[in-house]
Image (tube, rainbow, N blue to C red):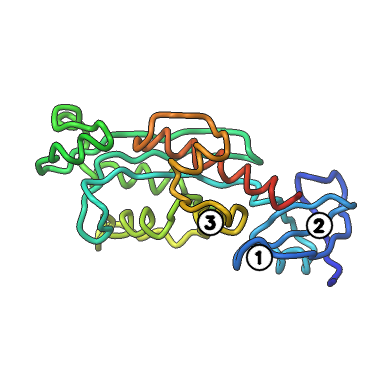
Amino acid sequence: MKLLTYKGSLREAPANCSVVGYVDDDIVVISVSGELYAIHYRHLADMQQGYSATAIPENYVVFDVETMGLTAGRDKIIEIAAIKYQHFAETDRFETLVNPMTYISPLISGINGITNDMVADSPLIGDVLPGFLAFIADLPLVAHNAPFDVGVVAKECGNTHKKPDNEVIDTLKLARRCFPMLASHSLDNLKRNLAMEQRVAHRALSDAYATAELLHICNRKARE
């Protein structure tokens, strides 16, 4: 096991630590003074240089989008929410409905409860993106089935806004590694099987909170 130097919020002074295992291709388990923590592998380089590293990074943003379908390159965003965390404690929140300027079908409304009347006076995605991109800044992003959510945002950015290239943590991948016995790793099924808080499903803010809770559960599972 390679010896590294940890200097972050979990310890008042620098402490030696070592890599003891892996939860996922992107997540590494380290031991600090006999306690186990999960971190993103990118922090290992900082630790070797004597800089800070924290357990599944200290500052991050959990986000979720609701769309008019399931195709990232085609379906428009009708709701977006993001929650900013510092070491698992919420510090700020971003939430808005989005007017897609097209008809929302009864099928989609039946899934997420978002109707045409609800978005009629909401801002357009072009007016929402600057605020959202400023909110996430360069912080690591956490999402469930992250390629879809990140892909939707990138598509909406088009050539007008800089596409986010933040570090991404996918709780779907984490859940598959931590709970391989489950037949489905959808957020709804994970909430039922892991005794998570039963928030309203398929709304951006409630799903973002559920994703944050799942991240914490996976982190504790990795430490066990």
Q: Secondary structure at mark 3?
A: strand
Q: Position of residue 70 (x, y in %)?
A: 26, 53
Proximity of marks 3 and 2: CB atoms separated by less than 8 Å: no
What residue lies at 60% left-to-right and 59% top-to-bottom?
177
Tag on residue 125?
A: none
The answer to whether 28 appears left or right of 155 in the picture is right
Task: Quickly name the residue at label 1.
Answer: 41
What residue lies at 72% left-to-right and 66% top-to-bottom?
44
Mark 3 burial class by Cα count in 10 Å: few <14, some 14-19, many 20+: many
Amino acid type for the residue under numbered disc 2 = Tyr
Residue in the foreground of this view, choosing between 95 and 35: 35
Tag on residue 6?
A: 2
- Mark 3 vs mark 2, foreground winner is 3
Q: Position of residue 122 (x, y in %)?
A: 21, 32
Quarter location, residue 99: top left
Q: Secondary structure at mark 1?
A: loop
Q: Can I make out residue 139 in this image? A: no
Mark 1 burial class by Cα count in 10 Å: few <14, some 14-19, many 20+: some
The answer to whether 43 appears left or right of 187 in the picture is right
